């Protein structure tokens, strides 16, 4: 039997209201994982790489990054490229969560190394449903 490590979910988004709603909807979908919210691209990379002065990633734990593309400091695609370009960090799964209308943009995310792309709907009820489905997906992946 394999060794199981609890997965910590990182939510990276610059709009505090959306991040709070996403966290609440994940909890409502049955997620009991620890959730850490980060607000800008530099903070995300500093946390994951351990290069920041504040809290940083515990190398003994597993992480899943839910990454919004529109971040200050470093945008989401820059953060993604830095993570996937780093041998120590590249195994961290990254889910891009962004509103995209063009297949070329989605292909850019996959080429940069994202593991999953989820279209972020503009309507709040659709967004809630999408996040709840994501929560169910995370639970299935844990099993």
Image (cartoon, rainbow, N blue to C red):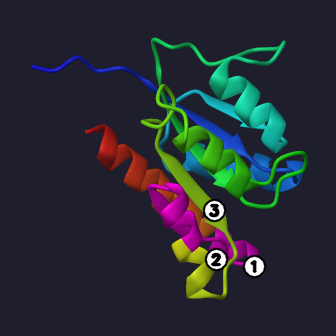
Mark 3 and mark 2 residues within 8 Å of each other at the beta carbon: no
Evaluate if marks 1 and 2 touch, with contact meaning CB atoms under 8 Å apart.
yes
The answer to whether one can see residue 23 in this image is no
Cα distance, mark 3 to mark 1? 12 Å
Label 1: state its secondary structure: loop
**Apparent side of residue 75 relative to residue 134 in the rendered image (left or right):** right
Q: Which residue is mark 2?
A: 126
Residue 39 drawn at (x, y percent): 84, 41
Q: Compared with residue 95, is residue 85 higher up or lower down, i.e. above or below?
A: above
Q: Residue at x 68, y 17 (%)?
A: 50
Q: Residues within 10 Å of mark 1 (few under 14, many from 20)?
A: few
Give the image quarter of residue 60. top left
Look at the image and say whether residue 110 sits in the magenta stretch: yes
Magenta highlight range: 108-127
Residue 27 position within the rendered picture, expressed as x and y whole percent measured from the top left: 58, 42
Secondary structure of the residue carrying tag 2 is helix
Farthest residue toward the bottom? 102
Please name which of the two marks, 3 or 2, marks the residue nearer to the observer: 3
Quarter of the image with the C terminus in it: top left
Q: Quadrant of residue 142?
A: top left
Give the class, few, some or many, for how many residues have Cα within 10 Å of label 3's Cα (few <14, many ≥20): many
């Amino acid at each position: 039997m394999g060794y199981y490590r609890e997965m910590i979910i990182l939510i990276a988004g610059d709009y505090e209201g959306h991040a709070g709603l996403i966290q609440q909807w994940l909890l409502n979908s049955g997620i009991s994982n620890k959730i850490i919210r980060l607000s800008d691209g530099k903070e995300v990379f500093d946390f994951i790489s351990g290069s920041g002065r504040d809290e940083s990633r515990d190398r003994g734990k597993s992480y899943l990054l839910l990454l919004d593309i529109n971040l200050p400091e470093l945008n989401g695609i820059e953060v993604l490229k830095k993570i996937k370009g780093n041998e120590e960090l590249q195994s961290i799964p990254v889910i891009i969560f962004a509103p995209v209308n063009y297949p070329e943009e989605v292909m850019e995310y996959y080429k940069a190394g994202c593991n999953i792309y989820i279209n972020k709907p503009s309507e709040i009820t659709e967004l809630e449903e999408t996040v709840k489905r994501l929560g169910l997906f995370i639970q299935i992946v844990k099993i």
